[in-house]
Amino acid sequence: MKKLTDEIQQHLEQKILPFWMKLKDEQYGGFYGEVDYNLEIQKLADKGGIATARFLWTFSAAYRVTGKEKYLERAHHLYHFLRNKLYDHENQGIYWLVNYQGQPRDTRKHVYAQSFAIYGLSEYYRASKSEEALNLANEIYQLIEEKGYDNDNRAYLEEFDQFWNPVSNEMLSENGVVADITMNTHIHVLEAYTNLYKANPTSELKQRLMDLLEVHYEKIYNKDTKFLGVFFDKQWNSLVNMKSFGHDIEASWLMDETIKTIGVKDERFDQMVLDIAYNIAEYAMQEDGSLINEQVSDQYDKTRIWWVQAEAMVGYLNAFQHTQDPTFKLLIDNLWNYIKQHLVDERENGEWYWSIESNGQPTERAIGEPWKTSYHNSRFCLEFIERMNKQ
């Protein structure tokens, strides 16, 4: 595994991070909002709140793991843009989008976006020890708990307008439904709160994380099928017969990270983590080593999306570390070979393609944009490096 990890670290530092580092906007702050399919930087593109928070996490974590100052410099730059331009100082919370100059473009507030702000800010604190950043992370945490949590059904809400009035969840719904509750928001609230706990452990936050694990087990996870539900109404009834394979394997290791971070001992949760990993391995992995995207009723989407492959790498590493089952080691090796042969963009100054179509051709979508950033594939690399360093 050490040889593999050395190769992955080289890939991170020579391919992934240099691609994103060149997007630094010296004039208006943050990173440029788009790199199109032809690898042209679109300097007038909007800049996303989620994207900026994910970039902040990436470069903070890269500095924390490698100790290289050039990554911390990017993290400082991103933090100032998030604090000064993306944060609504009057009404609180992170905007969905600002324009290239940092002026509000889409002022909706989404709990998902607030979660990523916490994730990025808490990682920046871990890297820089900026008390200001930690205070902002805690402020957004309190905001989510006050505005974005429904105590009656133990669910995190989704979308709000600029002034925190609830609105229809347009940004995280699909497949013909508008969901009151989503698995996606819940796993990323869990992820954010776990990282905040690493930065600033409190008994209150530990209890919230315990409650979140319980909600994942009782409401989101299907103990019979071993899949997670995706979209729910206000009573936690599933709205569509859908399986999201990438989210499942991502949730598997994110939940385990929470379990380890707060030191909870619960066999139900431990079993859930491994059952999900085995289930996705058996159900959705392909002969070419890749993981397909999703299934809705009896229709499969066999696109190989970049983030799905990255999260599967971590999910199977996590499962291997728990079980030492060689099945997971083989899955990792085959998936990494698939990523190198198909997803990595070998064009000069390329990074990873958005996805590979079922016919084997790259999808002609932007290489960088509000939903495609450095976070998933950088994190997979950093997780391998950190985990191997601890052995």
Image (cartoon, rainbow, N blue to C red):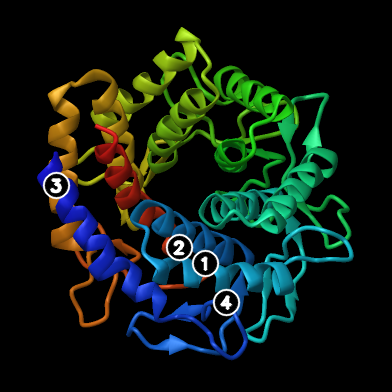
Labelled pair 1, 3 in contact (Cβ < 8 Å):
no
- The residue that mark 3 highlights is 4
Looking at the rendered structure, the kind of residue marked 2 is Phe
| Kind of element beneath mark 4 | loop
- The residue that mark 1 highlights is 75
Looking at the rendered structure, the kind of residue marked 1 is Ala
Foreground mark, 4 or 2, reads 2
**Mark 2 or mark 1: which comes first in sequence?**
2
Who's the residue at 24% across and 27% down the image?
A: 320
**Mark 2 or mark 3: which comes first in sequence?**
3
- The residue that mark 2 highlights is 59
Count of numbered badges drawn on the protein: 4
Who's the residue at 63% across and 27% down the image?
A: 209
Q: Residues within 10 Å of mark 1 (few under 14, many from 20)?
A: many
Labelled pair 4, 3 in contact (Cβ < 8 Å):
no
Labelled pair 2, 1 in contact (Cβ < 8 Å):
yes
Q: Is residue 191 above or below residue 371?
A: above
Foreground mark, 1 or 3, reads 1
**Distance between mark 4 and mark 3 Cα atoms:** 33 Å
Q: Is residue 82 above or below residue 334?
A: below
